[in-house]
Image: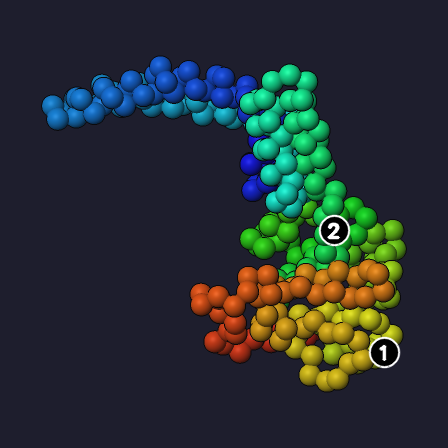
Amino acid sequence: MPFAGFHFNRIAVYGLVANAAAVPATALWIMPSALMTYLLAPFGLEHWGLVPMVWSIDVVRWIAHTVSSWRGAALMIPSAPLWGLVLVVAGGLWLCLTRGRRRYIGIMAILVGLSAPLSVDPPMILADRQGRYLAVRLERGYTISRTARSFAAKMWLRRVGQDRAPAWPQPGQTGGDGQMRCTATGCRLETAVGPVLISDDPVAIAQHCGEVVLVVSREPLRHRCAARVVDRFDVWRHGAHAIWLGNESVRVKTAHQSRGARPWVETTSRQWPRRQNRSARPAR
């Protein structure tokens, strides 16, 4: 369970129940049928083993579907640093391998490890490399500028333990109890550092460049701006961006910075980034 939660941000609450029912069917029915199939195949009689194997596989599938359909069968959890997993594993080993009262120290280590996700500060803004998707962290979690069907968008939600994303505000609407306001030309996000402009409209960006601390655009920005800028050129050159706004500063981390200079990491795209439609609408 700790390893599944660490790697996949998902815990099967009733996994023990499903295994208790499926493992005997596998050991006592599927495997003997497989052995029978192997022995009968040279004589052209493998169907005598395959048919009961199909029945047993259907039973295991039925168990899996039934247990997974129970309410609360899966629990989404946010990502945790590696030290959290290490503490949980070390605490479990200590609890099992030592004797006496001192073994209960392992429970303390497990509890501290389980609290590791609380130490993670998720980025406030995420931008994918293709310049298609933006995610903004509001009070109810991340909202994504498009339908969360891309691999990147699904990974963003999974990493913070979200099943689904709240709808991106339409023009004239607000999100996060007024934290983000959207118009036909873009969205304005209020943060502790200062306002952030999310827009693909070059005219709106030029008008508000001096009023905000950060401009995020899916289009290339071709003029100077007093605010910090993350545009199509930036994600094209440096990969996906994660942006934190706090402690009176704007901190940006890119995918290339995280991966480092590796021979198999392409630093720039071979093709010039395609320009998207500049029609007057918010970044969606």
Q: Does 203 appear above or below 192?
A: below
Tell me the residue that label 2 is attached to: 121
Q: Does 243 appear above or below 33?
A: below
Horizontal arrangement in the rendering, residue 131 relative to residue 112 (left or right): left
Horizontal arrangement in the rendering, residue 246 relative to residue 67 (left or right): right
Q: Residue at x 59, y 55 (%)?
A: 152
Determine crowd level at label 2: few under 14, some 14-19, many 20+ residues with C-alpha closer than 10 A: few
Q: Is residue 67 visible?
A: no
Considering every residue shown, the one lying at the far left of the view is 43
Tell me the residue that label 1 is attached to: 210
How many angstroms separate mark 1 from mark 2 (CA)? 28 Å
On-image quarter of the N terminus: top right
Horizontal arrangement in the rendering, residue 267 relative to residue 174 (left or right): left
Query: Disc 2 marks which amino acid?
Result: Asp
Mark 1, mark 2: which one is toward the viewer?
A: 2
Report x, y in % for residue 234. Answer: 63, 73
On-image quarter of the C terminus: bottom right
Q: Earlier in the sequence, mark 1 or mark 2?
A: 2
Q: Is residue 269 visible?
A: yes
Report x, y in % for residue 57. Answer: 38, 24
Query: Disc 1 marks which amino acid?
Result: Gly
Q: Residue at x 70, y 65 (%)?
A: 252
